[in-house]
Image: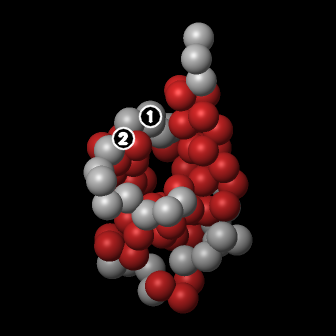
C-alpha cells in the first residue's frame, strides 16, 4: 500500500482509470460500467496489478467487467474488511 492513497476505494479506482488516459474524467463516475471504462484486456490487467500493488487485493477479470465502478469498489472494500478482520 502507498501512503498517499486516496480517501476511498472508489477514489483510488477513479485515479487509476484516469491515469491510464483512455477515459475522460467526466466519464469516470460511480454509475459507469467498468467494462466501458476498461475497454480492453490489457487495461483490465493493468487495473488488477495496480490494485494488488496499492491494496494487496486480488482482482479477477470477470468481476471487473461485470460491475459498475461503485459496485466494484464495494467488492474491494468488503475484501479489505475481511482481510483486516481478526481470525
Residue 38 appears in the figure: no
Along the polypeptide, which appears first: circle 2 or circle 1?
Answer: 2
Q: Nearer the viewer, residue 62 or 17?
A: 17
Q: Residue at x 54, y 77 (%)?
A: 28
Q: Residue at x 39, y 75 (%)?
A: 18
Q: Residues within 10 Å of mark 1 (few under 14, many from 20)?
A: few
Q: Quadrant of residue 71?
A: bottom right
The colouring scheme, among rainbow, by chain, secondary structure or one colour, is secondary structure
> In this image, 66 relative to 47: left or right?
right
Residue 73 is situated, as x and y percent measured from the top left of the image, at 60, 53
Q: Residue at x 70, y 71 (%)?
A: 31
Q: Which residue is mark 1?
A: 58
> In this image, 25 relative to 82: left or right?
left
Q: Which residue is mark 2?
A: 52
Q: Nearer the viewer, residue 14 or 68?
A: 14
Q: Quadrant of residue 85?
A: top right
Helix, strand or loop under label 2: helix
> In this image, 73 relative to 6: left or right?
right
Q: Nearer the viewer, residue 5 or 25?
A: 5
Q: Which mark is residue 23?
A: none
Q: Residues within 10 Å of mark 2 (few under 14, many from 20)?
A: some
* For residue 9, above or below residue 1: below
Residue 49 is situated, as x and y percent measured from the top left of the image, at 32, 45
| Quarter occupied by the C terminus | top right
* For residue 32, above or below residue 77: below
| Quarter occupied by the N terminus | top left
Residue 13 appears in the figure: yes
Residue 53 is situated, as x and y percent measured from the top left of the image, at 30, 43
Mark 2–mark 1 Cα distance, whole angstroms, equals 6 Å
* Mark 2 in CB contact with mark 1 (< 8 angstroms): yes
Residue 65 is situated, as x and y percent measured from the top left of the image, at 58, 53
- Of all residues shown, which one is farthest toward the top? 87
Amino acid at each position: 500500500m502507498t501512503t498517499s492513497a486516496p480517501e476511498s476505494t472508489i477514489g483510488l479506482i477513479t485515479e487509476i482509470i484516469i491515469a491510464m488516459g483512455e477515459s475522460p474524467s467526466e466519464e469516470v463516475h460511480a454509475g459507469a460500467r467498468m467494462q466501458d471504462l476498461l475497454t480492453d484486456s490489457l487495461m483490465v490487467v493493468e487495473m488488477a496489478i495496480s490494485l494488488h500493488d496499492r491494496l494487496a487485493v486480488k482482482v479477477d477479470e470477470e468481476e471487473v467487467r461485470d460491475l459498475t465502478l461503485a459496485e466494484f469498489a464495494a467488492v474491494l472494500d468488503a475484501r479489505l474488511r475481511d482481510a483486516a478482520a481478526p481470525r
